[in-house]
Image (cartoon, rainbow, N blue to C red):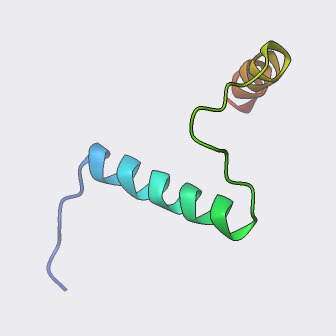
């Protein structure tokens, strides 16, 4: 099989598509224009920091 170089942008787009599909399958889609509460934003920031 011929080697193919993959860019970081292609990887990002692929992961976004996979995440959107996963959310749709689990019926967890967020409506357009939905604004997260401050509490949820803080929770996501903490999770992001501890995930590294």
Image-quadrant location for residue 26: bottom right
- x 72%, y 19%: residue: 45
Residue furthest bottom in the image = 1
- x 24%, y 57%: residue: 6
- x 64%, y 64%: residue: 24
Q: So how many labels did they put on this image? A: 0
**Horizontally, is 45 left or right of 17 in the view?**
right
- x 29%, y 53%: residue: 10
Percent x, y of residue 33: 58, 32
**Horizontally, is 16 left or right of 11 in the view?**
right
Residue 40, above or below 5: above
**Horizontally, is 47 left or right of 35 in the view?**
right
Considering the image in quadrants, where does the N terminus appear? bottom left
Residue 25, above or below 8: below
Image-quadrant location for residue 36: top right
Percent x, y of residue 46: 79, 19
Residue 27, above or below 47: below
Percent x, y of residue 41: 74, 19
Considering the image in quadrants, where does the C terminus appear? top right
**Horizontally, is 2 left or right of 6 in the view?**
left
The front one of 3 and 31 is 31
């Amino acid at each position: 099989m011929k080697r193919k170089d993959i860019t970081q942008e292609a990887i990002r787009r692929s992961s976004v598509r996979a995440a959107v599909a996963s959310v749709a399958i689990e019926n967890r889609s967020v409506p357009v224009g939905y604004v997260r509460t401050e509490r949820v934003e803080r929770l996501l920031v903490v999770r992001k920091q501890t995930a590294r």
